[in-house]
Amino acid sequence: MRVDRETKSASEGTVATLTARLEQSEARFRDVIERNADAIVVVDLEGIVRFANAAAEQLFGTTREDLLGTDFGFPLVVGETTELDLLRRDGPPLVAEMRVVRSEWAGTPAWIASMRDVTKRAEAEQNARRLIREQAARSAAERAVERLRFLADSSAALSSSLDHGHTLSALAKLCASHLADWAVVYIVDEQGQVGRLEVAHRDPAMEQVARSIRDHPIEPDGRHPVHEVLRTGKTIVRRIGDDADLRSIAQDERHLELLRELGVASYVLLPLLARGHPVGGLALVSGDRDRRFDDEEVALAEDLASHAALAVDNARLYREAREADASKMQLLAVISHDLRTPLSSIIGYADLLSMGVPEPIPEASLHHVDRIRTGTRHLLYLIEELLAFARLGAGDGGLDLRDVSASEVAREVADVMEPLAAERGIAFHIDIPNDRVTLRTDPGKLRQVLVNLTSNALKFTDEGEVRLEAAAMDGTVAFCVRDSGIGIGPDHLEDIFKPFWQVPETRRSGEGGAGLGLSVVQKLVAMLGGEVSVESVPGDGSVFTVRLPRYPLGAGK
Ligand code: ADP
């Protein structure tokens, strides 16, 4: 190719000028980069640092010489801002923010990374995040504690009584004070009718209005949402959007007015399920449009409802058991009483016959009449035992406290027992060292206790003696009935106090009791504020000890 000399020299001049300009602009560029406040590092395509400005020295905590020619080590992503954790040789670690552009350096392609220390901002962000996490954890923990406390309090309140009404009123109050603005407890009666049993309001001023809602019967037409809950056994959570919504659940105009007055923005209706069967429902109502019952609150209400249903069921079972017990006792009392009246006349006429009234009867017949007298006396004893037991069970337990002399009571018991002991050929002793032992107790009940124990002692002793002792010590008076009879095996010492229980070998068809004597003793002694215990050696005899407080609490001295 032929080149014109003039042209060549002209173009050489242009190249020189351009090169000079380029060098100038690159020098200016370097200068600008050098003075830049951001750290700037130029990295070639091999990842090797080709240039670093003064700010970069500071940021990396090292000298430019150490940086140049080394591997940059951080991924270079164009168009994104990345955060780098810088572990520095001199100084604490830093967090830097980096932006990367693709450019040229000394005529070859390179990356230019500019970085800025954002440690303070990163720390602030981290602190803020930690704070938020901690606050969330704290409020979750607080809510959990609150929830547990509420459940513990409510369980205690619900199980504090076996009275059905009391339990439900406690439930309504708990809900109104902790979970809603007002609460209603519905109950299904024996005929399957649903009724509002309890209503409570958070605001005492509204309590009266809330209660008047109970006067509105729940129609069995199924319109009321409680029917849905009872049918499905599932909780419902609803919002009341407008007045038409409210109208759809109101039973009548007055009911609608009451609902408007009380405020219904949303409600939760839960079934009260006892052993899988709905026994009632529980409604939690909020009048606040901005409030929603969240999942946690619904779960809490469900827990509460299951505790309440159990308490309601227990109360029902207890009531039924008591009713059954009371009618059993009533029956027992009536039968015993009706048996006693004709028996008394049999005994009376048998006594007259044996006394020769209206005229003496033959010797052989006299023996028969004696058998009638023994049999009827035994029957009377059994009836008395049944009557005493029935009276205690029916709650005939008023105490007639008086100042009583221990030896006087013992004397009265001996008056009844001595003839029986003599009949059986057993010695009967009273042993009260200090005649002035007194106590404040119910003398009738104490007498009955000692009569039962001494008659047992005589019954189960074939020879030897029976002793009735009394002694005072440390604010108590101990009465002991000691016999030298057949004794009781260690296996039976607890059972003998159970009603109708008798040691199998000692069951005596002709003269035994009904197995109620000791059960009556135990109940009476408990009523007198004392306790009864027994020690026995089979074959050697038994000692029954009754310890009574000399001055029971509240009886005064
Ligand atoms: P009951 O005397 O009418 O059978 P109790 O309740 O008084 O009923 O006593 C229950 C059982 O305890 C008696 O049947 C008897 O087996 C045993 N028992 C009671 N007292 C004595 C005693 N002093 N010695 C031996 N066994 C006794």
Image (cartoon, rainbow, N blue to C red):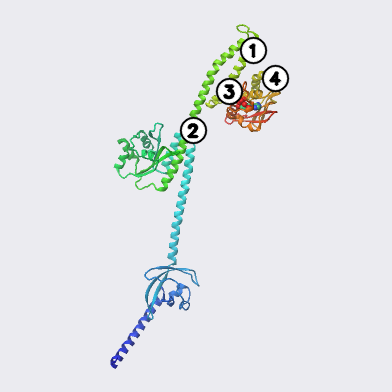
Q: Check whether the beta carbons of the residues at disc 1 and disc 4 lie within 8 A of each other.
A: no
Give the label, 3 or 1, closer to the camera. Answer: 1
Q: Quarter-wise, where is residue 540 in the image? A: top right
C-alpha separation, residue under disc 1 versus residue under disc 4: 20 Å
Residue on which disc 2 sits: 318
**Residue 367's mark?**
1
**Badge 2 density bin: few <14, some 14–19, many ≥20, Cα 10 Å:** some
Residue 450 in sight in this render: yes
Image-based side of 339 in relation to 20, left or right: right
Kindly identify the amino acid type of the residue bearing the numbered disc 1: His
Q: Check whether the beta carbons of the residues at disc 3 and disc 4 lie within 8 A of each other.
A: no
Q: Earlier in the sequence, mark 3 or mark 2?
A: 2
Kindly identify the amino acid type of the residue bearing the numbered disc 3: Glu
Q: Secondary structure at mark 2?
A: helix
**Badge 4 density bin: few <14, some 14–19, many ≥20, Cα 10 Å:** some
Give the label, 1 or 2, closer to the camera. Answer: 1
Residue on which disc 4 sits: 425
Q: Check whether the beta carbons of the residues at disc 4 and disc 2 lie within 8 A of each other.
A: no
Ligand 1 closer than 8 Å to label 4 CB: no
Residue on which disc 3 sits: 385
C-alpha separation, residue under disc 3 versus residue under disc 4: 24 Å
Image-based side of 462 in relation to 209, left or right: right
Q: Quadrant of ligand 1?
A: top right
User: Looking at this rendering, what residue extends furthest in the bottom direction?
Assistant: 5
Image-based side of 389 in relation to 104, left or right: right
C-alpha separation, residue under disc 1 versus residue under disc 2: 53 Å
Q: Secondary structure at mark 4?
A: loop
Q: Quarter-wise, where is residue 443 in the image? A: top right
**Which residue is nearer to you in this view: 102 or 374?**
374
Residue 198 in sight in this render: no
